Amino acid sequence: MIKAHQINYQNQKVSILNGVDINVGYGEFLAIVGPNGAGKSSLLNVLANEIKTDKKQDIFFKEKILSTWSLEELARHKAKFSQHNAQDIPLVVKDVVMMGRYPYFNSQPHSEDVKSAEKSMAETDVTHLQNRDYNSLSGGEKQRVHLARVLAQLDNDVAHRLLFLDEPLNNLDIKHQYKTLELIKKFTQQNNSAIVVLHDLNLAARFADKILLMGNGEVLSYGSPSEVFTQDMISSAYNFPCTICKHPVHQDTMILFG
């Protein structure tokens, strides 16, 4: 789906990313994890073609150089959920969600755009908020509205769509954290792919197919959750002791800190 080799990025002469390799397959759920300042969001922004690297480094999306895609075409193939969204949007919720359908119409949405918006609002549990002013919502409700917006954007017949999500679980209660990850998992099970920045290592272990563990702008480990989430690796990456055990029901890797 997307691959890049030796990504390097500096901001104001500070090295942010150092020689990062990445290769995400079709239908794969990749979780990017690591301590604060590891370069997770910067990597996501580079892969999403939102910031440029220091040197010409080609990122291949569906075996085509990402920078050669037209923005109009690209908007139907990939969407990005940012951790920083505008807090003051003078619109009602359904109109914010409809922003995800802008690539599909010029002046007025078509019936299929309305259906896509309604579908994504139902999936993210914000239908009951659709006529509320966006600015009146809580942080978690706003988070779910923007998730509905990016899901609406990728509601089409394109094969192999790619979803970028930067800390989508911020401000969400435990129920909606699980529902959000279940939505992403369902999306990837349809042979689409998702690259998700997460802080909760246990949820990453529960839902992701592959883990990319970062530290100081470099890849510390890459592989399945059981391969990456070892006691030595996690304790070293976070500079904090942890214990690895198995979930009593799902037998997934569980990480206990302290």
Image (tube, rainbow, N blue to C red):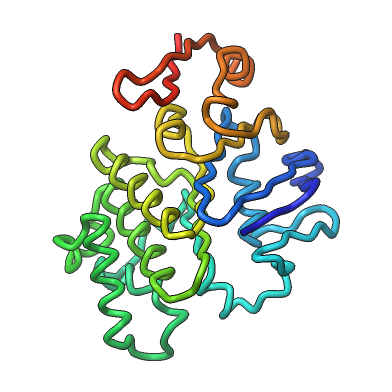
What is the x, y in percent for residue 216? 70, 30
Left or right of 71, for residue 209: left
Location of the N terminus by quadrant is: bottom right
What is the x, y in percent for residue 118? 24, 70
Q: Nearer the viewer, residue 191 or 44?
A: 191
Q: Is residue 115 above or below residue 167?
A: below
Q: Residue at x 21, y 55 (%)?
A: 125
Q: Residue at x 14, y 61 (%)?
A: 128
Q: Residue at x 35, y 20 (%)?
A: 247
What is the x, y in percent for residue 136? 22, 56
Q: Residue at x 42, y 20 (%)?
A: 254
Q: Is residue 160 above or below residue 34?
A: below
Number of disc labels: 0
Left or right of 82, for residue 61: right
Quarter of the figure with residue 59? bottom right
Location of the C terminus by quadrant is: top left
Q: Is residue 35 above or below residue 179?
A: above
What is the x, y in percent for residue 188? 45, 54
